[in-house]
Amino acid sequence: MVRSGISGLAATLADVTTLIVLVEIARIPVALAAFLGAASGAGAGFLISKYWAFEDPAPIRLQQLLAFASVALCTACFMAVAMQLFAVALGLPYLAAKAAAAATIFVLWSYPAQRRWVFRTAARAADLTASVASQLGESRVSRRLDAVGGPASP
């Protein structure tokens, strides 16, 4: 989750830069600017997440791109709604609203969705590797304890 968070921060840099330019220079309404910003960070986020955060060496597949696009589109919609609520309805400064919305949406939606639907093969492989390593470690500890007359394994 840490690498995914860092990947998200890199994608957020593109997202926030787009948001600032669109709001401050282009004078686009904040909800639309938030949607476009989220969409602009999606491409960078996909590549960083795929190859670094989830360590997915498989070639990019159409199904994976469509799954990522679906998650990114939902994330952008959630962001637009959250920004409308936090920045417009509640009157928070838009960058503070963006930070609060991004953190909430990451934890509740985008990380779980990416792990489950977009990068599931890599995530399952990582889970399996951790499980096997854990079992091997427990097995080695049990054998060492048995060898020195320690507690018997259950």
Image (tube, helix red, strand yellow):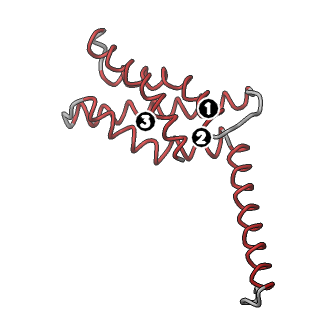
How many neighbours does mark 3 have within 10 angstroms: few (below 14), some (14-19), or many (20 or more)? some
Residue 2's disc is none
The residue that disc 3 covers is 78
Label 3, secondary structure: give it: helix
Q: Is residue 143 left or right of residue 78?
A: right
Counting residues from the N terminus, which is met first, the one under dot 1 or under dot 2? 1
Residue 101 in percent (x, y) is at 36, 39
Label 1, secondary structure: give it: helix
At x 39% / y 37%, what residue is drawn? 102
Name the foreground residue: 128 vs 64. 128
At x 18% / y 33%, what residue is drawn? 91
The alpha-carbon separation of the residues under discs 1 and 2 comes to 7 Å
Residue 50 in percent (x, y) is at 64, 33
The alpha-carbon separation of the residues under discs 3 and 2 comes to 15 Å
Residue 60 in percent (x, y) is at 73, 27
Which residue type carries mark 2? Gln
Q: Are marks 1 and 2 in contact (CB under 8 Å)?
A: yes
Which residue type carries mark 1? Phe
Which residue is farthest left?
A: 91
At x 37% / y 19%, what residue is drawn? 17
Which residue type carries mark 3? Phe
The alpha-carbon separation of the residues under discs 3 and 1 comes to 15 Å
Counting residues from the N terminus, which is met first, the one under dot 3 or under dot 2? 3
The residue that disc 1 covers is 68
Image quadrant of residue 140?
A: bottom right
Which of the image's four quarters has the C terminus? bottom right
Name the foreground residue: 83 vs 6. 6
Q: Are marks 3 and 1 in contact (CB under 8 Å)?
A: no
Which residue is farthest top?
A: 26
Name the foreground residue: 74 vs 143. 143
The residue that disc 2 covers is 114
Counting residues from the N terminus, which is met first, the one under dot 3 or under dot 1? 1
